[in-house]
Image: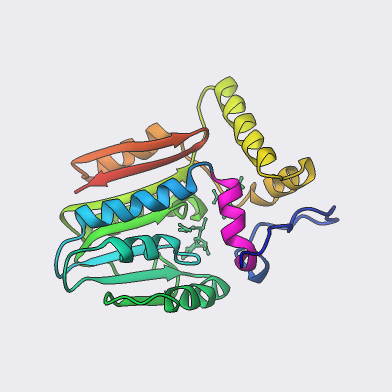
Amino acid sequence: MQNKDTLFSTPLTNIGDFRFDQGVADVFSDMIQRSVPGYTNIIATIGELAKSYVTPGSRVYDLGCSLGAATLAARRNIDASEVEIVAIDNSEQMIERCQRNLGAYRSEIPVHIACEDIRQTEIKNASMVILNFTLQFLPPADRQALLNKIYSGMLPGGLLLLSEKVHFEDTQINELQIELHHNFKRAHGYSELEISQKRTALENVLRTDTLPEHIARLKEIGFKHASPWFQCFNFTSMVAIK
Ligand SMILES: C[S@@+](CC[C@H](N)C(=O)[O-])C[C@H]1O[C@@H](n2cnc3c(N)ncnc32)[C@H](O)[C@@H]1O
Ligand SMILES: O=C(O)C(=O)C[C@]1(C(=O)O)C=C[C@@H](O)C=C1
């Protein structure tokens, strides 16, 4: 049973910073599907990419794994032998639920789940790294170092899947995209109050880059290929190949 997200549905006297706490972990599946256009499609595509890019004897990293949706999609689709998945999140409540979710399905592929800061995670022997709406929550100054570390720990030909909320340099286009995103939320049953209170809660926590900034950084780090493969409004998903 999926719990419905009603976290921002009543007026809050004090809107604190958005945190991945118990309340969010309990409704996260519903929240992300009703908030991120294309989320289900992105998860399915992660599975397809895992099938094509994960190589025998290598590792897959799911950084900021939340409830394990991307890990599950990858695990279901990997054909290569002797593969290990490493799923990391620094929210105990997410990790606890992630463990339960993954335990509910049988698989030959081991998943090492850990509650830690992805800035501390050692990356090695990776044929695929997934950052599905996680980098955006890191302080902007820490993003380059994390991506450098990921690049260093990847095998040649390995694939980074990077999904992010973005903003646009052109103010009018930016406002248009935000409005379309809000319409998406309205269409999924969120009220004006829910939309505006969540926006305030995310303000200091989710700091977006632009799509050109992302692609330029990936190329500068050394990825041979980097491109968006999906965009809907202010949400994009990119692939980068070492
Ligand atoms: C939007 S969610 C990711 C959704 C998930 N990847 C999926 O596909 O369903 C962002 C996650 O990143 C985690 N996170 C944020 N900063 C982190 C950090 N520094 N280290 C580890 N996890 C982090 C949060 O706890 C949260 O679960
Ligand atoms: O609701 C929004 O506006 C969002 O930005 C969606 C978003 C995200 O992109 O990570 C924000 C917080 C939750 O983790 C789920 C989804």
* Magenta portion: prevailing SS class: helix
Q: How is the image coloured?
A: rainbow
- Marks counted in the figure total 0
Location of residue 66 in the rendering, given as x and y in whole percent from the top left corner? 50, 65
Q: Nearer the viewer, residue 130 or 52?
A: 52
Q: Is residue 91 above or below residue 216?
A: below
Q: Quadrant of residue 212?
A: top left
Q: Is residue 132 visible?
A: yes
Range of the magenta residues? 24-36
Q: Is residue 96 left or right of residue 126?
A: right
Q: Is residue 55 above or below residue 110?
A: above
Location of residue 2 in the rendering, given as x and y in whole percent from the top left corner? 61, 64
**Residue at (30%, 44%) from the top-left corner?**
239
Location of residue 16 in the rendering, given as x and y in whole percent from the top left corner? 73, 58
Q: Is residue 121 visible?
A: no
Q: Is residue 218 above or below residue 72?
A: above
Location of residue 35 in the rendering, given as x and y in whole percent from the top left corner? 60, 47
Q: Is residue 19 above or below residue 105?
A: above
Q: Is residue 87 magenta?
A: no
**Residue at (43%, 79%) from the top-left corner?**
103
Q: Is residue 94 left or right of residue 230?
A: right
Q: Nearer the viewer, residue 23 or 224?
A: 23
Q: Nearer the viewer, residue 170 or 26?
A: 26
Q: Is residue 214 left or right of residue 17?
A: left
**Residue at (31%, 75%) from the top-left corner?**
107
Q: Quadrant of residue 199?
A: top right
Q: Is residue 210 left or right of residue 121?
A: right
